[in-house]
Image (tube, rainbow, N blue to C red):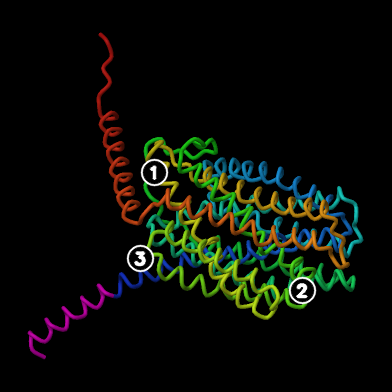
Amino acid sequence: MSGHHVLTSSRASKQSLHRRTPLRERAGRESRLLAYSSGNMGKALLFSGADLTILFLLTDLLGQSPTSAGSLMLVAVLGDLVFDLLAAKLVIRLRRTGRGYRWMVAAAAMPCGAAFALLYALPALGVRDLWIVATGLLLFRGAYAVVDVPHNALMARVTSDSRSRGRVSGYRLFFSTISSLAIAIILTPMVQTAGRTGDFGRLAMAGGIACILFTGTMVLSALASDSGTTGPADVTGGDDGIAIPLRDPLILALALLAFITGFAIPMFSRMLLYIGTYVIERPDLVKMLLLGLTIGQFLGVLAWTSITGRFSKATLLAAGHAVCIISIMLFALCLAWPNALIACTLLIGFGFASIFMLPWGLLADAVDVVAWRYHRRFETGLFAFYLVVVKASGAASTALIGWALGWLGYAPDTIQPASVQAGMLVMGLGVPIIGSLCAIGLMRANDISHTRHARLLTALVYRSKRALRQQRRLNSVPIRFPG
C-alpha cells in the first residue's frame, strides 16, 4: 500500500473516531436523562393512582360521607405543606454530609411504597374509622414527599441546557403516562368493581404490586442517573435553602402556575368517574375515557417533546392550555353522544401533555434565574416550594369536590338530581377552562427563551470564575504582623 493511501486511511479513521466519540457522549447523556426520567413512572403509579381514586375510595368503599372525605383531604393539604418543607430541609442537611439526591430517593422508596399498599389494604382489613384512614393517608403523603422532593430537584442537576430540560420534561411525562395507562386499565376499574361487588382482596393485592414496582423503579432510576451530572456552576454564596425570595415576580408566577396545575386542570380527571357514572350514566365508558386521555397524552408527549428545541417552553405551555380549552368545550358539546367523548378525551390528553410536562423545565430554568438575581442557588427550596403549592392545590381541589358534592346532596349509587349533575359539570369542565385561560396570560408575561437562558448560563459561569479568581487573590496576599 502506498504512503498516500496509508495517510488517507489514517485520516479517515481519525475523522470517523471523532464522529463516533460525540455520538457516544450524546447517547450516554440521553441515556442518563432517560434513566432519571424513568422514576416518574413509579411516582405517577402511586400519586396519580391515589389522586384519581382516593375520593371514590373514601366515599364508596370506606363508607365516608362526602363532607368527611373532603375534610380528610383538607388535612392532607395541611400535611403536604409540612411534609414537603421538612423533606427539603432533610435533603439539604443530608447533601451537606455528602448524601445527595440519589441516595435519598433510593433510601425512601420502600417506606413510601409500603404506605401506599397499606392505604389500599384498608377496605380488605375492614377499617372504617376516620382517624385510621387519615393516619394512613398522611403516612403515604409524608413518605412520598421524601422521595418526590429530591427526585424533582435532581432535574436541575442532570442537565443545564434549556433545550435538554425540555426533552427531560417530555421523557418524564412519557414515563408518567405509562403509569396512567396502567391506572386507566387496571386500578380505576378495580376500584369501581370493588365498590359494586365488595371484592377488596384484589384491591389490596394491586396495592402490594404497586409497592414493589414503585420501589424497583425508583431505586433503578437513582442508580442509573449516576453522579455524572451536568448542572450549572454554582455562584458565590450558592448555598441551598428553603427561605426562597417569595416576593420575586418570577416565583410568584410559578406559584400561580402551580396552583392552576394542581387545582384547576386535574379537576377534569377527578370528576370523570362521577360524570361518567352519574351524568352520562355510562359507568362502563369511564375506562375508555381515561384510556383516551392517556393515549392522547402519549401522542402529546411525542409531539410537544419534538418541538421543545424550536420554541420556548412557555410558548408551548400556553399552546397546550389553548388545546385544553378547545377540547373541553367540545367535550361539553358532545355529552349527548357518549362515543364521541372518547375522541374529545384524546384531544384533551394531547393538551394535558404540555400542561403537565413543561412546568418542570421552566422551574429548572427559574433556579438559574433566581441564582443570578440573589447569588444563591435555591435548588431544593424552589422545587419543594413548587411541590407544596401543586400538592396542596390538588388536595384542596379534591376537598372542594367532596364539600361541593355533600352540599349539593350527592348520594352514592343513586340517580342524581339535576343540581348535582350541573355541579359535577361545572367542577369537571368549567374550572379547568378558567384555569387554562389564566395560565395563557401568565405565560405571555413570563417567557424564558432558550437564547435568554443560554446567555444567563454564560453570565453565571463568568461570575463564578471571577469570584473564584478574587478568592484566590485574597488567599495569596501575605499576612503581615505588626512589629
Q: Which residue is mark 2?
A: 189
Q: Is residue 123 left or right of residue 340?
A: right
Q: Residue at x 54, y 62 (%)?
A: 223
Tell me how far mark 1 sits from mark 3, CA to CA.
28 Å
**Identity, as a three-letter code, of the amino acid under mark 1:** Asp
Q: SS at mark 2?
A: helix
Q: Secondary structure at mark 3?
A: loop
Indicate the position of residue 231 as horizontal and vertical percent values: 41, 52
Alpha carbon separation for disc pair 2 and 1: 48 Å
Tell me the number on the disc at residue 310.
3
What amino acid is found at the position of numbered circle 2 in the picture?
Pro
Residue reaching furthest to the top: 483
Q: Which residue is mark 1?
A: 234
Dot 2 or dot 1, earlier in sequence: 2
Q: Could you tell me residue 170's position as x and y percent?
A: 49, 66
The mark found on residue 219 in the picture is none
Which structural element holds mark 1? Answer: loop
Q: Position of residue 113 (x, y in %)?
A: 71, 60
Task: Pick whichever, 463 or 321, lies toward us.
Answer: 321
